[in-house]
Amino acid sequence: MTRGPIQLDVAVSYGLPRKGLPGSASFRKWIAATLETRILRADVGLRIVDAREGRSLNHHYRGKDYATNVLSFPAELPKGVKLPLLGDIVLCAPVVAREAREQHKPLIAHYAHLTIHGVLHLLGFDHQDEREAIVMETIERGVLATLGVADPYH
């Protein structure tokens, strides 16, 4: 089992009924696996939202008028403030479910992948160019493999 950070606090909130959605223990496991060997202490907020809230957040923060699968908000701490706060991740349940169906993936595996993807964004990884995308996808594949989840890019 993945140990993860020595100290990890994951606050999960649901902006819609929780039925059929992963529980906080699953999200914590996926976040811990992503942070393994990368960071010792971390606080992460994770919110699961409906399409309306997802669209509103994506519009407000990215200027895009649609709900997207995952949004990441790295903590912007003032200079000199040393807290283990990494930031917040938002997953849009209807988009995640639709993508899992369209891509013929188990829903839980898609949630695991997108949670890991969001955490990597909090750590500063990106996929704006091909080189960055390859690095990020390689890390995602590796973390998912440790969890027994198939390669999401295959």
Image (cartoon, rainbow, N blue to C red):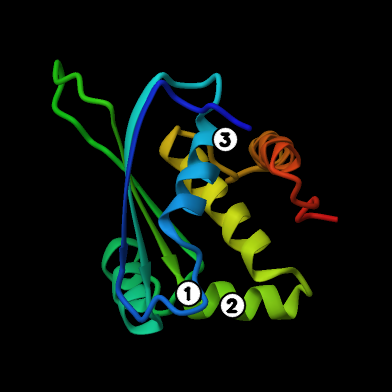
61 up-or-down from 50: above or below: above
Q: Is residue 18 left or right of residue 105?
A: left
Q: Earlier in the sequence, mark 3 or mark 1?
A: 3
Q: Say which mark, if any, is on residue 97.
A: 2
Name the residue type under label 2: Ala
Kindly check if marks 1 and 2 are in contact, taking CB atoms under 8 A apart as contact. yes
Name the residue type under label 1: Ala
Secondary structure beneath label 3: helix
Measure the C-alpha gap from mark 3 to mark 1: 22 Å
Task: Indicate the quadrant containing the C terminus: top left, top right, bottom left or bottom right.
Answer: bottom right
- Mark 1 neighbour density, 10 Å: few (under 14) some (14–19) many (20 or more): many
Residue picked out by circle 1: 93
Q: Residue drawn 58% across and 46% down?
A: 128
Q: Earlier in the sequence, mark 3 or mark 2?
A: 3
Q: Is residue 7 left or right of residue 109?
A: left
The image position of residue 1, as x and y in percent, is 63, 32
Q: Residue drawn 65% across and 75% down?
A: 99
150 up-or-down from 107: above or below: above
Looking at this rendering, what residue extends furthest in the right direction?
A: 154
Residue picked out by circle 3: 33
Which-is-in-front pick, marks 3 and 1?
Answer: 3
Secondary structure beneath label 2: helix
The image position of residue 124, as x and y in percent, is 45, 33
Q: Residue drawn 41% across and 21% down?
A: 6
Foreground residue, 42 or 79?
A: 42
The image position of residue 12, as x and y in percent, is 33, 56
Foreground residue, 17 or 52?
A: 17
Q: Say which mark, if any, is on residue 119.
A: none
Measure the C-alpha gap from mark 1 to mark 2: 6 Å
The image position of residue 70, as x and y in percent, is 47, 61
